[in-house]
Amino acid sequence: MAGILLACLPIADPASAQTVTVGYTGAAQTLRIATTGTYQITVAGAQGGNGGNSRQGGAGAVIVGDYDFSAGEVLNLIAGGAGSSSTYGGGGGGGGSFVFDQSSNTLIVVAGGGGGAGSNRGGGGGGQVTTSGASGSGAGAGAGGSNGDGGAANPYDHGGGGGGFLTAGQNSSTFATGGAAYPSLAGGVARYGEAGGYGGGGAGTTEGGGGGGYSGGGGGSGYLSFGGGGGGSYEASGFTLISATAGSSGNAISVAGNFGNGYISFLLSQSNISGQGGQLSDVGSSLTTEFDGGSLTSDANATTAASFTITGKGGTLDAAGHTLIFTGVFSNANGSTPGHLIISSNPTAGGVIVLDPVGVNTFTGGIQVLAGATLQIASASALGSGTLALLGTATMPAELSVTGTTAITDPIVLEGDPTFDIASGKTTTIGSVISNATPGSPAGDLVKQGGGALVLTGANTYTGATTIDAGTLALSGTGGIVHSAAVTNNATFDLSGSRQSVRLGGDYIQSGSGLLVLRATPTIGTGYSPLLASVRATLSGALGIDLGSGTYAIGGKYDLIHASGGVSGTFSQVGYAGSFGPYILPSVVYQPDDVYLELSPQPVLVDSGRAYVASRFAINEALFDDIDAILGGDSAGSARSGVWMHALGNFGSANGFDFHTGGTLVGRGFPISPVWIAGFAVNALFTGTSGGYGTVNNTETGIALYGIYHHRHLQISFSNAVGGLSDNFERSVPEFSVGARAGGAGLYDVAAMRAQYALRRGLFFLVPDIEAAYAHTQIGTVVETRAGSLGLTYEALATDLGRISAGITGGMVLRRSFGTVEPFVSTGGYGSVGQRRYSNVETLQLASSVQTATAAATAAYTAGAGVKVIGTGHWRGDVYWEGAWGDNKSMQDLGLAVRYIW
């Protein structure tokens, strides 16, 4: 269609917007919309032509309303022309005015033209405000069209019908044609009459033609030459009608509508927020609530409840140093590609944009928060959907402030030094991945501020540093920050909710105000969160350990922190949430590359078992006494010939325990030459060690072989004894309701050699002696019963001791009627070699404890006294006492020997 291309409507500040009017040219005109916004459109139909006898054509209708256009839309405009007037005949119908959107193929609005006047009986009818055209006047006149059709005409010498949008008006005869339909909309023509106006006006003869419009007006009646009817008008859906004025009929007393040619005018009443944007105060007046690439700001703190839409060009909320609160809903513009929302402010002045919608923001283009700006929300529902980009700089952060408890699931990207400020008592959970903004951009740091908690559950990939300045940063589930360059903790770093080992890509640095929270569970190695700093860990401040429910094993060990580059510093405080149980004493242990949590037993639970290893002292003393008694001598019984019995016992203290021993030996010696005696003996010994929390009772039974050489003053004796050991241990720890028992069995082997030389002068004698002895004991692993999970297991014991002793005995011989009595005294000492101190390993659940005790004195001083009674017959008896002191140990020996010689 041929037309005229008009200049684009100007992109003007709505406050200085101007009206653009398109007048009649006789052809269609094209108009391109330059600025998106709401336009007030005034459309006026043309007046019908005048007729003879001063008959006037009807006025065109005038339609005024608002309609929204987007930049780039192309409109086809038809400004109707007035019908031709006649001096003697009827006038042509006036043309309608049309606005058609070629971009969307939509008819927007039509204003009907007035009917032409007749030459005798009446003026033309006015343009209608309804969609139907009016019928012509007079009998037999043409009917008005409806639903977009043209008006009718009487085929016999009447005016032509007005053209409609869809169909043309009816011809009256070969002398007058109806107006054309869209897009031609040419006026009707008459051989002997007046032409209709452009815009679908019907031609007039002696009768008036119908007016053009959405539906055409009917032609006037030929009987007495009446006027034509006015054309109908139209408003599309979305057209907001402000006013509709019907044209007055010709020669009416009261006139209304448009006279002359039609026209179309546009006024940009409200522009979308585009270009340079505008003030928040202009929203609803000169600005619409649609963002189209522009910026909205304010000169002061402000709150608006307006809801906004966002086109694909996006929009910007500029705080400009103020606090702007938006409680309306942000959504995508209809039919538009989703656009993003930018949060900005003067970097030096700060400012806060608060999105606090009554409903849920549904726009899907995401949000960008620029350096120096703060976006404050109470709920993630304010963020719409799409990526949240915090685009700060190294010196000017972009901040997300959250005042409520919420969960964010859309991706977040970081650049520079963005800040997450979570209000005290509130928790923000981010389940999506936090990453760097774009490849090559500055690495995104994460700075946690505010007294609340930020919980990360995603496998985040941002590579900048992580700084916790206030509140809590927590990793939960499988959340991680493995790519973060370093973590600096000045507040709380909580890993208690993590269900995997947490690995950091750089150093972990905790200041004196920092708190690290880790988790322990009864299952060692799983369900807890060791912190792995791949480079270094610098520690200070506090450590908190959150304990899962269940029973913890004594001896459990957790690798809390491992740093391949080394650990420096220590935690000044360690606290536990929950309880390990009354039996466990937790401790944090620092190694060059690790920090461990060790669950040691309460000391009394293992120290109470020390009586077991301490009982070795009494056993060894009993065995040495036993072998010494077999060897005989002036200090401990006479030479062992014949049948003999020796009872012995001692008591004392060692290792902090009291002990006692006792036993009996029975033997038979056989003289095999004048200088040799050989014999054997059996023994039954017992020992007891008690003190602290335990009592150990031991028995030793065995057999010994011995030989004695004596010639004049010299006596040399030797012996070897072997036998079995049995242990019975009772341990009681009342504070933990422990009453344990244990029993074990083993072997012993003792060998000794002794030499003495007796000097006698009259009634007196002096006997120096020297002795060397060796004792070996062994007993298997012993396991306690009746103590439940607090029972100890004692490692197998084996001791090897050597003893070298020397002494001198002096006395006198008193002869009596029943025999002789020889009182004596002795003194000397001994030294021990071998395992003088013995360590034994106790196991309590997973814990091992080493208990150490003295198995024999290193050296001791001895002194004794006794008396021998030698009968005149076959019997003799000895009784003696001997004491030994050394290494803070003391012993008292009592001996009794009886012999009968056959």
Image: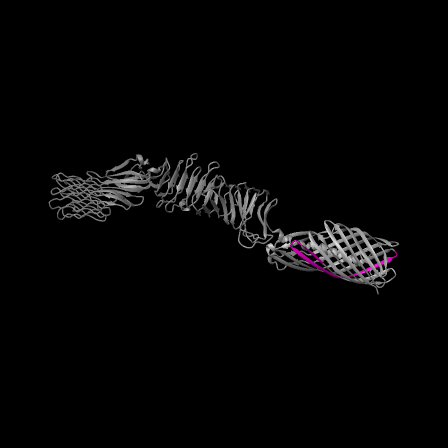
Q: Position of residue 842 (x, y in %)?
A: 65, 54
Q: Quadrant of the C terminus?
A: bottom right
Q: Is residue 363 left or right of residue 471?
A: left
Magenta segment main secondary structure: strand
Residue at the bottom extreme, as displayed: 902
Q: Position of residue 18 (x, y in %)?
A: 29, 35
Residue nearest the viewer, comparing 1 with 36: 36
User: How is the structure coloured here?
Assistant: one colour
Q: Position of residue 43 (x, y in %)?
A: 24, 40
Residue nearest the viewer, comparing 573 with 565: 573
Q: Quick check: can you spot residue 437?
A: no
Residue 704 occupies quadrant: bottom right
Residue extent of the magenta highlight: 687-712
Q: Is residue 414 left or right of residue 607?
A: left
Residue 569 occupies quadrant: top right
Q: Quick check: can you spot residue 149?
A: yes
Q: Is residue 589 left or right of residue 875?
A: left
